[in-house]
Amino acid sequence: MRTVNELQTIATQVRRDILRMVYAVKSGHPGGSLGCADFLTALYFKYMKHNPSKFELTGNQEDVFFLSNGHISPVFYSVLARSGYFPVPEMATFRKLNTRLQGHPTTHEGLPGVRVASGSLGQGISVAAGLALEKKLNNDDSTVWVLTGDGELQEGQIWEAVMFSKHYKIDNMIVTVDFNQKQIDGSTGDVMGITELSSKFLAFGWEVLEMDGNDWNSMDTVIPQAQAKLGQGKPIVIIMKTEMGQGVDFMMGTHAWHGKAPSEEQMNSAMAQLPVTELGDY
Amino acid sequence: MRKFEILGSKDTRSGFGAGLLEAGQADENVVALCADLTGSLMMDAFKDAFPTRFIQAGIAEANMMGVAAGLAIGGKVPFTGTFANFSTGRVYDQIRQSIAYSHTNVKIAASHAGLTLGEDGATHQILEDIGLMKMLPGMTVINPCDYNQTKAATIAIAKMHGPVYLRFGRPKWPVFISEDTPFVIGKALMLNEGTDVSIFATGHLVWKAIEAGHILAEKGISAEIINIHTIKPLDVEAVIASAKKTGCVVTAEEHQMNGGLGDSIAQLLALKMPTPLEMVAVNDSFGESGTPDELLVKYHLDSQDVADAAIRAIARKV
């Protein structure tokens, strides 16, 4: 089991990867990626039981993760590469012609670690619930994880999937909502309020937990609590508070970095805040 | 003109129901989902035989498509069931991203397609679904013509890997394809060899093409009638060979001219071998309430319309 220090080192390197990928092609989504870097590091390097070196699309007998908010592909690609799904240097091809690291994740180019395309929002919980149901039919007791954005909860399909998951007692799935309260056009409260989020999920019959996705103590408390609730007849959601742009001071506290690349000067400042780790840059 | 024996009168959706049951018996990975239309889709037999492999999705088609994709990722062979309208336009982006682009092994079973849905009217009579689905890369599009062919198609698509759109309908319709006729995905079925005009028909309009063949025979016209059950991938060789032989073409379908079988064949012939072509299809219009027979007459999809189109096509030969 890795120590918190080791996980923090990985997360710092993941943040460097995110910014270097986005900066190299002057496009991509750094804000949400930085916000979720700690959580995805925790999942891929501590909590999920998975087989990075022998990727099987079906995910039978292993924990599976789906990224519903596909635009935060930089953080997804970094944790996949760093945990061994594909070569670390391949991150240099992000968003370039003929890459397997498309702007939004896809199975189409055969990138190991990706099981469905995402990018058009609102579809991930449905797909995850389908695979979770498949695992139940096969008496496979591994867990399906899925991450969604909070702005993404404005999509109607989300609530179809939330209703479905309760009806079919999908209790082998943990949904995490990246609750950073920001989306492209501004704060979620200004764009389209998603108020009383915990109450909404409770009303749909889910187990609801809350945690701080940028606080290792909080994650190490709440993720095991969520896992302890598996198999009890209810789907589980973690409302995960994060800071968009976490780790780079000028990217925090604003929605401006949802989908924008830094300038050279900004990049230098960001890199200075995230010193290179012993893992090394790609 | 070959004489076709009418083997019965059955709805194509019942052929789907029977085929789904057989596919389920043959492969335990076959599962079925339905959006509150189990009876209409004739999925009760499958549900009764395999209750744990039947998933009632409620009136939430977008989620149903996503759940089907997830089941397919794990290795199941999911069939989704709802009306053609709710199987396509309502869930186009879910199909595009989670099924077509992700190449998940989902079979989209779509009933009540076209005008022959009848009295429910235009909200439910989708005439654009073939076009929507054939535009998606990697999507196989099949529109069988009678009960036996729908049953055979259902069994065949369960055995192939990849997304499929299977389109069928509501009304009782003549059964004329024998039970032992093999269903080969992507292969046109020659129904009557002829020399004067090629009629390519799909779905319910295949029977209308056969009736048109008899009308034409009385006038001394020899019609070649070919059943195109697989609109995508199109059997290019069969279409070219027949068009070359007869020198003119009619297409017949229960769909808009835009985006349908006629559109596919016109594109193929324009690119490879320009040939006079007439289309029997709905011309940029919504449907309306009425009986299936009344609607086919009003919207010019009847046997006489197919025969008239053949005569027009022949007149255009140089």
Image (spheres, helix red, strand yellow):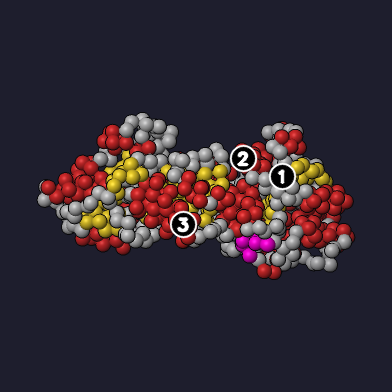
Most extreme residue toward the front is: B49
Q: Position of residue A113 (x, y in %)?
A: 66, 61
Kindly identify the amino acid type of the residue bearing the numbered disc 1. Lys
Both marks 1 and 3 on one chain: no
Q: Tell me the magenta residue range.
A: A56-61
Instruction: Indicate the amino acid at tag 2.
Output: Glu
Which disc, if any, is residue A160? 2
- Tell me the quarter of the picture where residue B121 sits: top left
Instruction: Give me the disc on residue A150.
Output: none
Please say whether residue A123 is visible from this viewpoint.
Answer: yes
Q: Residues within 10 Å of mark 2 (few under 14, many from 20)?
A: many
Q: Which mark is residue A234?
A: 1
Please name the residue that numbered disc 3 is placed on.
Answer: B23
Disc 2 secondary structure class: helix
Question: What secondary structure is found at the residue carrying circle 3?
Answer: helix
Labels 1, 2: one chain: yes
